[in-house]
Amino acid sequence: MKLITKDGHRVYYSKYHLKVHADVMEHLEEAMSRIDTNGAAFIKLAVQFDYVIGHTTCVQVRNNDEFRYAKRLGRKYPTRFVMNRQAEPCSTVVVIMKRTPNSENYGYTLLTAYIGGLATKEVHDPKLEYEEAHEANEFWSKNALIWDETILEKEDA
């Protein structure tokens, strides 16, 4: 699969990293073709489709929800999960990518892509900057990922 942005930049990606978000793969080429990078060094946006393309597993929490923390595949820190909830229909693909050092020749590197809405970094993310902490705490106090043992490290599943 070749990923090319609307303004012609090639986007490189890791199949291993996207393994957790395999459902986004069939929509990624179209999503990229709609993105005009304008040469930005960092891009984080939601690409809206006119129809439901899948289901989001990041949901708003309710007062009576039950939670667990566990490590997702390839992560060092735990993620907040909500138990006994179903994925919700969604029509957006979130794309997060950064310009490569030699962007004239190599374009962008895809950091992540998934079906769902924009989210902040997780509260335990070691790359969370001081300025982002309040927004992250606010977001993750109201949202959580749906429990899914297939995306967890073996010791937590």
Image (spheres, rainbow, N blue to C red):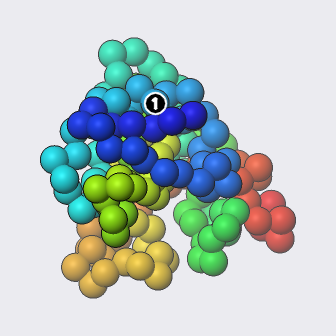
- Image coordinates of residue 23 in percent, x first then y, are 60, 34
Q: Residue at x 57, y 34 (%)?
A: 1
Q: Residue at x 39, y 15 (%)?
A: 51
- Up-down: is 77 above or below 25? below
Residue with the most extreme left position: 38
Judging by the rendered image, the residue that carries numbered circle 1 is 29
Residue with the most extreme right position: 154
Q: Quadrant of the C terminus?
A: bottom right
- Up-down: is 11 above or below 105? above
Q: Does dot 1 land on a helix, a strand or a loop?
A: helix
Q: Residue at x 47, y 46 (%)?
A: 113
Residue 29 showing in the rendered view: yes
Q: Nearer the viewer, residue 23 or 25?
A: 25
- Residue 97, by quadrant, is bottom left
- Image coordinates of residue 67 in percent, x first then y, are 60, 60
Looking at numbered disc 1 in the image, what kind of residue is underneath it? Glu
Q: Residue at x 41, y 79 (%)?
A: 127
Q: Residues within 10 Å of mark 1 (few under 14, many from 20)?
A: some
In the drawing, does residue 120 fall left or right of residue 79? Answer: left
Residue with the most extreme top position: 51
In the drawing, does residue 118 fall left or right of residue 82? Answer: left
- Up-down: is 148 above or below 3? below
